[in-house]
């Protein structure tokens, strides 16, 4: 199974692709899609859509995971994040991918074991779980990889529960 994790943001959207085969997790690719700060918001959304579409066509994931908005103190930021999430989900849906959603708390619990973990802790656990030489360069990419790992772990748990 190849899972595309997405950490949506209006300026930087992280993505990470994790392969699961034979109980082993391998990082296929991760990175960021950066929208130019001075561009109109609609151009930023188009950049996210086009960038994710390119990643999907190149890497051919089986499913996608998009980080859900858990809590936001700033309404304007939450609305922009919602737009970025919608564009990310649309890119995945247009490619025929099933889309799953997890909150940051669920992702941190699955990867670190602590829902209030710091970004540095998530990055370190991503490195360890995937046996990487170094942490991914971007926190946004690490968060996206963590979302993919979360889904793989959750899917395995659901499978075990279904058999019980």
Image (cartoon, grey):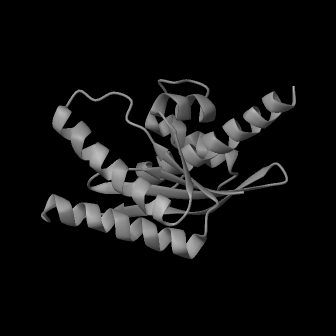
Q: For the N terminus, give its image quadrant.
A: bottom right
**Picture mark count:** 0
Camera sees residue 43: yes
- Nearer-the-camera pick, 42 or 9: 42
Can residue 36 be seen here? The reply is no
Is residue 89 shown left or right of residue 11?
Answer: right
Q: Which residue is drawn at 65% across and 55% down?
A: 132
Viewer-proximal residue among 135 and 92: 92
- x and y percent of residue 134 in the render? 58, 55
Residue 151 vertical placement versus 59 (above, below): above
Residue 67 horizontal/vertical position (percent) = 45, 42
Q: Which residue is drawn at 36% across and 70% down?
A: 50
The residue lying at 47 percent from left, 24 percent from top is: 116
Query: Vertical placement of 36 versus 123: above or below?
Result: below
Residue 86 in the figure: left or right of residue 129: left
Residue 37: x, y in percent? Answer: 17, 61
Q: Please report the residue visible at 31 percent of the width from the left and 51 percent of the height from the top.
A: 84
User: Which of these two is toward me, 160 or 145?
Assistant: 160
Q: Where does residue 28 sit, x and y in percent of width and height?
A: 63, 64
Comparing 18 with 68, the one in front is 68
Q: Please tell me in which quadrant of the rendered image residue 78 appears.
A: top left
Asked if residue 74 is positioned above or below residue 9 in the image, the reply reads above
């Amino acid at each position: 199974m190849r899972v595309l994790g997405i950490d949506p943001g209006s300026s930087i959207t992280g993505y990470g692709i994790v392969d699961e085969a034979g109980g082993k997790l391998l990082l296929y690719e991760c990175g960021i899609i950066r929208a130019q700060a001075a561009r109109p918001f609609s151009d930023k959304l188009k950049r996210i859509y086009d960038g994710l579409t390119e990643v999907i066509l190149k890497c051919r994931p089986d499913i996608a995971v998009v980080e859900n908005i858990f809590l936001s103190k700033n309404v304007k930021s939450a609305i922009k994040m919602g737009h970025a999430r919608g564009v990310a989900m649309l890119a995945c849906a247009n490619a025929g991918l099933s889309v799953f959603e997890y909150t940051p708390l669920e992702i941190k619990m699955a990867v670190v074991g602590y829902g209030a973990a710091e970004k540095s802790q998530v990055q370190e656990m991503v490195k360890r779980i995937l046996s990487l030489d170094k942490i991914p360069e971007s926190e946004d990419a690490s968060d996206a990889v963590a979302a993919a790992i979360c889904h793989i772990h959750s899917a395995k748990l659901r499978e075990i529960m279904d058999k019980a």
